Amino acid sequence: MNKSIFLVTCEHASNQVPHVYQRLFCGAESVLESHEGWDPGALSLAKDISYALNCDLIVYEYSRLLIEVNRSSWHHQLFSRFTRDLDAHSRMYLINTYYTPYRQKVEDSIKKFVFEGYQVIHLSIHSFTPNYFGQEREVEIGLLFDPQRACESHFCEDWLNYLKGNSKLDVRYNQPYQGIDDGFTTYLRTQFSNEEYLGIELEVSQKIIGDQSIHLLMEDSLLAVSSFPHTRLVH
């Protein structure tokens, strides 16, 4: 394996709800508009990054409050307060119709690239609220990964060094969340080896994600890191 390829995804791109389920969200428009319903700004950044890297972009088109595609099927947050009281048949329908097809599409894309001999660098793009239950978050950009996976660690080390060397942003490893917490990348790591797959979540504060200079910095940083010698990434 001597070549790598990027894949960009956005699990919380939208706060839309399919028409058939809108009755469940009557009066909850403000919740859907909030960070509870989606990641504002994440889709625009994901589009710009995928365009700059000339790579595939896969997007989940509905609100995380319908069903949370960034959680394992056993997780208590799979269904939100708006959908968890649906009967078992209806919940399984959501899994089969929305959850599984999206996740399978991403996994199949990775399998295809791995079969073709690529190491896949999966970038899952998110935004986070700068004020969490009244507490101001100082971190502005978080690179989430598994420190036990050498390729992910090396990639994020190079990426963080570039960002810190070319901006004054507060960039941190595994903040405001841990890269090993339950999520889609966590599952995908169980399906592919360290050499085959890098699962990295990019978390950007909603305070800055709308700034076009941040988009350009992300694009430039990833283009720079991808041009570094691959000896540290591909073994």
Image: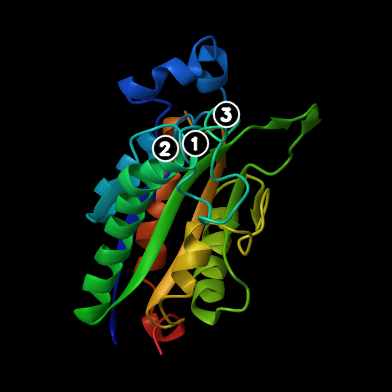
In the rendered image, the vertical position of residue 59 relative to residue 134, given as above or below = below
Choose mark 3 or mark 1, whichever is in front: 1
Is mark 3 in CB contact (under 8 Å) with mark 1? no
Label 1 element class: loop
In the rendered image, the vertical position of residue 147 relative to residue 83, given as above or below = below
How crowded pointer 2 is (Cα within 10 Å; few <14, some 14-19, many 20+) is rated as few
In-front residue for pair 158/82? 82
- Residue 91 image point, x, y percent: 45, 41
| Residue type at the position of mark 3 | His
Is residue 221 visible in this depiction of the protein? no
In-front residue for pair 154/145? 145
- Residue 87 image point, x, y percent: 49, 36
* Residue at the spot of label 1: 87
Question: Which residue is pictured at 58% across the width and 59% down the height?
Answer: 144
Is mark 2 in CB contact (under 8 Å) with mark 1? yes
Residue 35, which numbered label?
3
In the rendered image, the vertical position of residue 81 relative to residue 154, given as above or below = above
**In the rendered image, which quarter contains the C terminus?**
bottom left
| Residue type at the position of mark 1 | Asp
